[in-house]
Amino acid sequence: MKLLVFTLLCLATVSLCLASDVSDKPENFDVNYHYSSSDRPDPFVPYQKKHINIPPGQIGVEDAVLVGITMTARDGYVAVLRGSDGRVHYLSAGSKLFDGEVLKVDPQRVVFKQILPSGERVHEREVTKELHPEQSSN
């Protein structure tokens, strides 16, 4: 009995699909359709950096130049960074920047979390700055 009901339901479903007016033929598509991304970025265009004006006295992830790394008894490893304004900043893990924060400082590198606003969304990425980048490429 269950098999008979199941078979009848399958036949009814197939017949409804065959009788429907919707078709995948090209003449049924709107050829005048135009996609509008409105405030969404185009997924096929690489991320384009927008120049952000960093307030005086603050430092941004992209503009930071790793000058050195030192160690203190209280904070452990501390990164010595020079900002675009030429000022030197001493930052340890957890320190906030204008567009991110320091995730980790070790003897050879600093790892940042950069926050990139993109329309209504916020993207995060990790940025690593090496103390001696020419040595790490070998």
Image: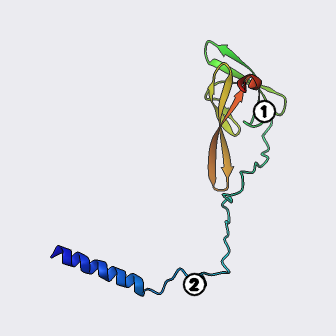
What SS does tag 1 mark? loop
29 to 111, vertically: above or below = below
Name the residue rendered at 65%, 14% in the picture. 72
> Residue reaching furthest right?
86
Q: How many marks?
A: 2
Q: Observer-nearest residue: 27 or 98?
A: 27
Quadrant of image for the C terminus: top right
76 to 127, vertically: above or below = above
Quadrant of image for the N terminus: bottom left
Q: Is residue 48 visible?
A: yes
Label 1 packing within 10 angstroms: few (<14), some (14-19), many (20+) = few
Q: Which residue is mark 1?
A: 57
> Residue reaching furthest top?
73
User: Disc 1 residue type?
Assistant: Gly
Q: Quadrant of residue 41?
A: bottom right
Name the residue rendered at 66%, 81% in the picture. 31
What SS does tag 2 mark? helix
Which label is found at residue 28? 2
Q: Is residue 89 visible?
A: no
Q: Quadrant of residue 110?
A: top right
| Nearer mark to the viewer, of 1 and 2 | 2
Name the residue rendered at 41%, 84% in the picture. 18
Percent position of residue 94, x then y: 61, 29
User: Disc 2 residue type?
Assistant: Asn
